[in-house]
Amino acid sequence: MKDYFDARYPDVSDLKARAKQRMPKFAFDYLVGGCMEEISVARNRQDVEAVQLRSELLKPFDGSNLETEIFGHKYSAPFGIAPVGLQGLMWPKAPEILAKSAKEKNVPYILSTVSSASLESIAEISEGHAWYQLYNPTDDGIRNDLLNRIKAAQYKVLVVTVDVPTFGYRPRDIKNGLAMPPKMTLKNIWQMVTSPAWFVETALAGKPEMQTLKPYMPKNMPTDELAAFMNKTVMGRVDIEGLKPIRDFWQGPLVIKGLINEADVAKAVELGADGVIMSNHGGRQLDAGESPIKPLQNVSEKYKGKIKIMMDSGLRSGTNIAGALASGADFTFLGRPFVYGVGALGNKGGYHVINSLTLQLTQIMNQLGCSSVEDLPNYLVK
Ligand SMILES: Cc1cc2nc3c(=O)[nH]c(=O)nc-3n(C[C@H](O)[C@H](O)[C@H](O)COP(=O)(O)O)c2cc1C
């Protein structure tokens, strides 16, 4: 299973097409969609695709090594699995499937606060290798309780997401009346029963719920009240003052996710954060927002070495990962591609995506004549 590669799906677009056939429409829409007119989703792709690299062919070259050390751990590749909420709604047991494949392939898996799996169960599957993504709770009691659970479960890295001061305005989800567990409307029931593999697996796995947050929810809360609960409980604006108690509590590596602006990176450095993930949430929050690949070069020139600079949003291939690393990222993450993988291939999906991205990135580095990930910036066409 660990080396699984399915020749029917060499590209992420192949997985996306297959996942679309197997998932109920409301779940696929939630995964694929962005906010407003989805301009930012498209722009992320355009700006990533515009990066060009220049090979050097006549020098001696002994092959490439993808291993990348970050926060004291040497990963097998310079990419990981970004936090994606409600994963279990999109494919039953998706967090468990992805956490297991990430652990076995030695790449990081970041568990979302709004996951369908409990943080304790993912910590067990990951054997202490997973990272945890926190939406800062507005209630200090909930925040402290969550932080204690994250620490007790021995998560390696804490990632605080700051680019959701308000819910994204997402027309697809508004039209579909998205909720977790899904609402039992005629339309949704039809979509579920006409996705037989999803339907059977969901029946076996049990209805998807937010297991990590469940202890803080009122008992038997109607599905309709979930959005209001989330808005009230965990989706507050996080400013530098809000981050200080988290920095004081968490002694391990702390990463701030969702930054685009150099001024915010400066504040993260000032806070004593260990890393930032430059991200626009995959185009799901600010439709006029800049793609994170754009400010990356400047941020990296200024802050490389002071803080780990990571990037996500719009990466779909080894080429894109190489482009982000060449533009100054120390590490990269991908969100949707891994869920497309699980949607298309079930419990083999994580392995397939990791293996295909590894093959692609290796090919590109060999083509460039680049022997290590840190050397990629030397091949960027400026
Ligand atoms: C369906 C979906 C749910 C997401 N949920 C979360 C989340 O719970 N927490 C978070 O920090 N980011 C979340 N993100 C953003 C991802 O972590 C990541 O920034 C984004 O997916 C990267 O863009 P990409 O999908 O183009 O790779 C979500 C993204 C998607 C597509």
Image (cartoon, grey):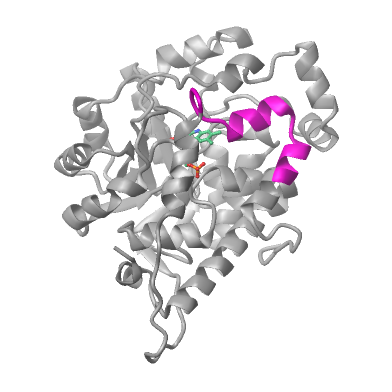
Residue 376 locus on image (x, y percent) = 35, 69
**Which residue is rendered at x = 38% and y = 72% of the image?**
54
Residue 171 locus on image (x, y percent) = 56, 19
**Predominant SS of the magenta segment:** helix
- In this figure, what is the number of numbered marks? 0
Residue 181 locus on image (x, y percent) = 66, 20
Q: Is residue 99 above or below residue 34?
A: below
Q: Is residue 302 above or below residue 19?
A: below
Q: Is residue 300 above or below residue 363?
A: above
Q: Is residue 111 left or right of residue 351?
A: left
The magenta span reads: 17-37
**Which residue is rendered at x = 52% and y = 52% of the image?**
127
Q: Is residue 198 left or right of residue 167?
A: right
Residue toward you, 98 or 54: 54
| Residue 328 makes an appearance in the image | yes
Q: Quadrant of the N terminus?
A: bottom right
**Which residue is rendered at x = 60% and y = 41% of the image?**
95
Q: Quadrant of residue 192?
A: top right
Confirm whether the magenta stretch covers residue 20.
yes
**Which residue is rendered at x = 51% and y = 72% of the image?**
362
Q: Quadrant of the C terminus?
A: bottom left
| Residue 108 makes an appearance in the image | no
**Which residue ends up furthest to the left in the rendered image?**
270
Q: Quadrant of residue 183?
A: top right
Confirm whether the magenta stretch covers residue 68.
no
